[in-house]
Each structure stands twice: as structure tokens, then as C-alpha cells.
Amino acid sequence: MKFLDLRWQFEQIPEFSEKIINLIKKGTFILSEEVRNFEKEWAEYIGVKYCIGVNSGTDALALALKAIGIKGGDKVIVQANTFAATVYAIIQNQGIPVFVDIDYEYGCINLTDLKKTIKKESPKAIIVVHLYGQPCFASEITKIAKENDIFLIEDCAQAHGAKWKGKYAGTFGDISCFSFFPSKNLGAIGDAGAVCTNNPEYFEKIIMYRNLGAKVKNIHEAEWGGNSRLDAIQALVLSMKLKYLDKWNERRRKIASKYREYLKDLSVYMYKDHPDSYNVYHQFVVMVENRDKIINMLKERGIPTLIHYPIPVHQAKAFKKYADRELTVAEWISKRHFSLPMSPHLTDEEINFICGNLKEVLKHGKKPKPICS
């Protein structure tokens, strides 16, 4: 059994090979019709005015921060349970990352700690990360940002198609950023990303920033420019797969429901599904006290697992100088959590096999004692 089998997705798309070959024969690969088509499709899908295709989710974050004017010394709040790319995007703009703790029940940013940190640090922006597919507290965070006159950036790298109170992740902040890394709910066949916004000023800036400061070839207008373009092959792949995203997300939710039913009385802790959230389950994460033992027992039974992520970012060597306090919940979670297989390619038989073995293995587990955030 594989934790993730990306080949399965392409077997579901009959026209995949033909369309890729036709594009190669056409020979237009940079800022082409395919890129414009996907930008339009993704903007319409989530419900924003503008989408700018870029070469990665990391660059999407960095360009978004640059567009809102983050520069040397500006503080940007970010939660401690995110991938390093979120933090590197701040540092690339000479900003200062300010870490906050996470919510124990839902695994999202902790609103109480967020409010305290805003009052103490006077940040210029917040990056909220919709981790594992659940866009928690989106409307509340939007309200906090507006009340404090702070920019809000959404990191939606794991939240393609997720919703909060019926509204898509990526439509709450000033700018939202998506990764289309191959393993994502909507993934390319290489690195790819997008920046989304309703603000025409940010749109114009990012259009130039991604393309060496130019809206038109060789007419360089912006004070800064890089090479961060979404290429045509990736855009075409994303357009083809977008048609299946809702179906694949529903399959993830069905798998998650089965996991929850099997695990509810066992020695394991799970994040709750918020009633206002449409969780698209990029990962299904559980917590146990004796994690290494449980992971090894599952491995022996042919069940792969992963840890997303083993070290909270504020404790990473690269970022320790920015961390001035313990973040209790993030640190507690990081020692106990691991991810079960979660992908629409998993069959009912495979899910039954995983769940049956989990029941046996977790007899040897210890349920974590609750911790208050």
C-alpha cells in the first residue's frame, strides 16, 4: 500500500496524454493560453476577481507579502504548525516572523494568543494557514485583522475547495496563496502555485513581480521583478484535474468519516471538525502518546504513515532566533501527531484494512491526556 499514489489521478483523466502531447507540439509554454485559462477557471471556482499563476506556493506567499509592502523590520504573525515555506516567505521580504500558538481542539491558529500577540507586537500582517484542509475561524480572523488594521494573507496550500460558512478558503483575506505541489488536493506534475485577490492594485503588482517587472515583454515597469511564472504544462494539468476536485474531496471526506467512526473509542486523539468548516482533509492527523511504537507496528503490517511536521517551525534551527517563548500546544502536538493514509485513490478494501489494523495496534497505545491551549 502507498501513502499516496499520484499515478491514479491521471488514470481517471482519459484525455490527459493527448492534451499534453498536443501542447508540446504547439510549442507555447510561457504565459500561454493554458495559463490564462487556468487563472480564469481557478478565480471563478473559489470566487475572486483575480488569479495569478506562479511557479510555487512559496513564491506565491513571498510575492503576496511584497505586494502589501512588507519590508525590513515589519512583523508578520504566523502560527507554529505550518511548513517552513510560510516562514521563509516572510524572511525573503526582510520581515520578522512572530509565532503564535494553535488551537487544541481544531489545530488552527489560536484566537486568544493571536489577539494578545497583536496587542504586544503591532504586526503589519497575519498569515493564517488552513492546515490539513480545515479553514478554521476564517471569519473571526478577518474581523480581528480589520479591527486592528492589519493585512491578512491566507496560506491555502492544503485547502483547495475547503469552505468556512459556505465561503471558499482563499476569499477572506487581502490576498490568498495556493500551492499546487503534486501531493496537494489539486496538484500539478511539478512545482506550481497561484496568488488570488480582489484588489486590482495587488493584482497589477504581482503580474509584474512574477515576470521580471514587466506586464508586456521587455517593458520593465516595477521596481522589483523575479522569474516566477506558472508554465503551460502545469496550467493544463491543473485545468484537467480541476474538473475532478470536488469529487476527489468528497472521497477524502468519506474516508475521514470512516476513520473517525473506527477511532472514536480507541486510544487516540483527533482534531474536531468545526461545524462551520467544510474540511477537505489534505491529511488525516491523529495523536498518541507512544507515537514511534505505533508507527512501527503499523509499518510492520504494511500501513505507511508520515509526520506533518516533526518540528514546529518556531523550534527549527533556521527560525529559533525569532522565537521568544514556548508555544505549549504546538509543541505538545508535534511530539504525538502523525498522518494516516489519506487520498481518493484508497479503496474501501484498503480503508477497511487500515481501520482493522488500527484497532489491533491501538490496543497498545496510550491516549494523550488533554492539554488546554
Image (spheres, rainbow, N blue to C red):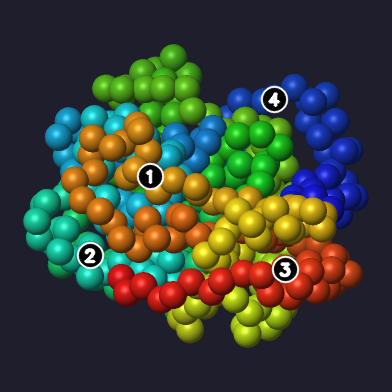
- The residues bearing labels 3 and 4 have C-alpha atoms spaced at a distance of 53 Å
Q: Find residue 95 and report its horizontal and vertical position in percent.
A: 23, 36
How packed mark 4 is, by other alpha carbons closer than 10 Å (few <14, some 14-19, many 20 or more), is some
Q: Find residue 175 and report its horizontal and vertical position in percent.
A: 36, 51
Q: In this view of the protein, which residue sits in the foreground, 26 or 327?
A: 327
Residue at image point 47% right, 55% down: 335
Q: Are the residues at dot 1 and dot 4 in contact (C-beta closer than 8 Å)?
A: no
In the visual, does 326 lie left or right of 255? left
Residue at image point 79% right, 26% down: 24
Q: Find residue 45 and report its horizontal and vertical position in percent.
A: 57, 61
| Residue indicated by mark 1 | 313
Occupied quadrant, residue 49: bottom left
- Residue kind at label 2, given as amino acid type: Asp
Q: Is residue 247 visible?
A: no
Disc 2 or 4, which lies upstream in sequence? 4
| Residue indicated by mark 2 | 113
- The residues bearing labels 2 and 1 have C-alpha atoms spaced at a distance of 17 Å
Q: Are the residues at dot 3 and dot 1 in contact (C-beta closer than 8 Å)?
A: no
Occupied quadrant, residue 161: bottom right
- The residues bearing labels 2 and 3 have C-alpha atoms spaced at a distance of 36 Å
Q: Find residue 267 and report its horizontal and vertical position in percent.
A: 59, 76
Q: Secondary structure at mark 2?
A: helix
Instruction: Give the mark toward the camera: 2 or 3.
Output: 3
Q: Are the residues at dot 2 and dot 1 in contact (C-beta closer than 8 Å)?
A: no
- Residue kind at label 4, given as amino acid type: Thr
Q: In this view of the protein, which residue sits in the foreground, 67 or 37?
A: 67
| Residue indicated by mark 4 | 28
Residue at image point 38% right, 29% down: 209
Q: Which mark is residue 361?
A: 3
